[in-house]
Amino acid sequence: MKLINKIALGLLVAGSLATVCAESITFGVDVAPLASLIVRDGVIRNPSGLLLAPGTKGPSTVSVGGFTIMTNMPKWNLYFAFANNGNLVNKSGNTLVNTAGAYMHLGAAADATLTNPGQVWLKAPLVNQVKGTDGKLGAPQTMDVTSVTLGTAAADGVISTLKPTFTAMLKGGTTAACGAACEDNGWVYGTDATTATFDVGTYISNTALPGGLAGTYTETLYITLVTAY
């Protein structure tokens, strides 16, 4: 009986000296957030090269610049602003006018004396490279943007104070895949990584011919890419 007690005591002592080793290994893949905006140089054209009948803009007409966005982040948007409110201005600050003396607007807002202004719009990629939803609660509306669905009608793809974001353009378009059903919440929720190149197109109304002093008249479009998870 004493021998059994001694064996039990020996096991108890040995157990108190036992060591438990526990380690963990974390493995997988790290995808760094990617968001970039690359712009091309703008094109300075003869005014006659920008004369178009109002409402005739679209992928088949001339472009004056462009930019590329690359992002793997699901929530993104483009914001736009003009340096001169859509007016063509030279280095001396003079604004291009028509033969009647009214300002030659590129933006969608018409001067009081110019009822047929020009416009600035986006031409989307030929191959569908922008895919996403508008992120609305309930049933999100799908965005499926191509050059066929953006920039082909009078109101589609126009950059203006009323359409200063990408979703606002899509919502305001008549032929865009998003259309009136979209919620203009200022965001595109991507369903795929996006690498897309956009052309910037513009025109001035051929019903109001350019006049004014000789010189180079330009406008600057500011583009901001905003992304988030």
Image (cartoon, helix red, strand yellow):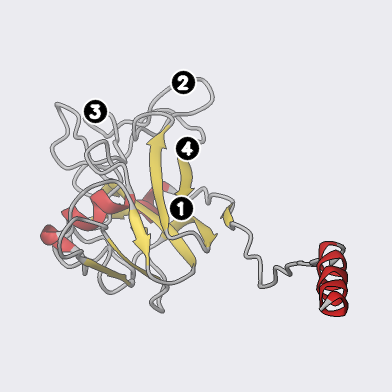
**Spot occupied by residue 24 in the image (x, y as percentages of width and height):** 73, 67
Please state which amino acid type lies under the numbered disc 1.
Answer: Tyr
Q: Quadrant of residue 16?
A: bottom right
Tell me whether circle 1 and circle 3 mark residues in contact (CB < 8 Å): no
Q: Work out which quarter of the rendered image holds the N terminus and state it.
A: bottom right
Number of residue marks:
4
Q: Quadrant of residue 179?
A: bottom left
Say if 135 sits above or below 168 in the image.
below
Q: Which residue: 41% across, 55% down?
A: 75
Real-space CA distance between mark 2 and mark 4, rounded to the nearest whole angstrom: 14 Å
Please state which amino acid type lies under the numbered disc 3.
Answer: Ala
Mark 2: secondary structure: loop
Please state which amino acid type lies under the numbered disc 4.
Answer: Thr
Front disc: 3 or 4 = 4
Q: Residues within 10 Å of mark 2 (few under 14, many from 20)?
A: few
Q: Which residue is mark 3?
A: 102
**Spot occupied by residue 138 in the image (x, y as percentages of width and height):** 15, 61
